[in-house]
Amino acid sequence: MFLSTTTNNLDAKGRISVPSDFRAVVGDGNFDGIIIWPSFDGDYLEGGGINLLEDYQKSLDMMDYYDEGRVALQRAIFAESRRLPFDSGGRVTLPKELAEYANLNGRATFVGLGRRFEIWNPEAHEARSAEVRRLARANRGRLVSINTQNGGGS
């Protein structure tokens, strides 16, 4: 799982160190790197490993093949995705257009979200944090205990 929030420096060539615990999550032997794409929810990047994209594909496969929502999601995720391999130091090189999309100017904040992660401009992330906490507080009752759901105790 992708956990924690870390801000790292982005050099002039677009190279940035991916947090080591993030690197450990995506290592599957077939591709040693991360996959990222521009979020369609805001000016930040979303990412994960190949397993996440395979799960997205399985979910999309349940939609009608020519459903325009399905096609829009395929274009927004798969067509915009970039595979970024790790170098020997655990860094990736962000394509310039993706760094510009997320307004990454010298620093980037990696935000772990369980099965996926986000990459934010640090100031934009900080500005959004208070609203996210408010929304989480308002929605905490929606979390269901697995033990309760399965008929077990708490």
Image: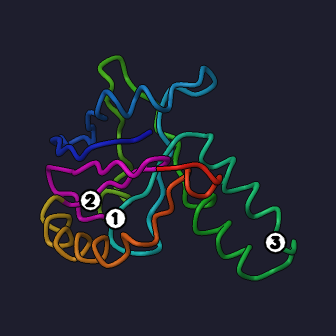
Q: Which residue has dot 1 on it?
A: 44
Evaluate if marks 3 and 2 touch, with contact meaning CB atoms under 8 Å apart. no
Q: Considering the numbered disc 3 on the image, is that residue within a helix, a strand or a loop?
A: loop
Q: Position of residue 133 (x, y in %)?
A: 23, 69
Magenta run includes residue 107? yes
Of circles 1 and 3, the one toward us is 3
Q: Is residue 141 above or below residue 51?
A: below
Q: Residues within 10 Å of mark 1 (few under 14, many from 20)?
A: many
Identify the residue at image location x=48%, y=57%: 37
Q: Position of residue 121 (x, y in %)?
A: 21, 61
Q: Considering the numbered disc 2 on the image, is that residue within a helix, a strand or a loop?
A: strand
Identify the residue at image location x=35%, y=48%: 112
Name the quadrant of the N terminus: top left
Q: Residues within 10 Å of mark 2 (few under 14, many from 20)?
A: many
Distance from Cα at disc 1 to Cα at disc 2 = 5 Å
Circle number at residue 120: 2
Evaluate if marks 1 and 2 touch, with contact meaning CB atoms under 8 Å apart. yes
Q: Is residue 25 left or right of residue 29?
A: left
Q: Which residue has dot 3 on it?
A: 63
Magenta part of the protein: which range?
Answer: 101-121
Dot placed on the residue nearer the N-terminal end, 3 or 2: 3
Tag 2: amino acid? Trp
Of circles 3 and 2, the one toward us is 3
Identify the residue at image location x=34%, y=29%: 21
Q: Is residue 97 above or below residue 65?
A: above
Dot placed on the residue nearer the N-terminal end, 1 or 3: 1
Tag 1: amino acid? Tyr
Magenta run includes residue 118? yes
Q: Residues within 10 Å of mark 3 (few under 14, many from 20)?
A: few
Q: Is residue 81 above or below residue 11?
A: below
Of the pair 92 and 50, the residue shown nearer to us:
50
Q: Position of residue 124 (x, y in %)?
A: 18, 68
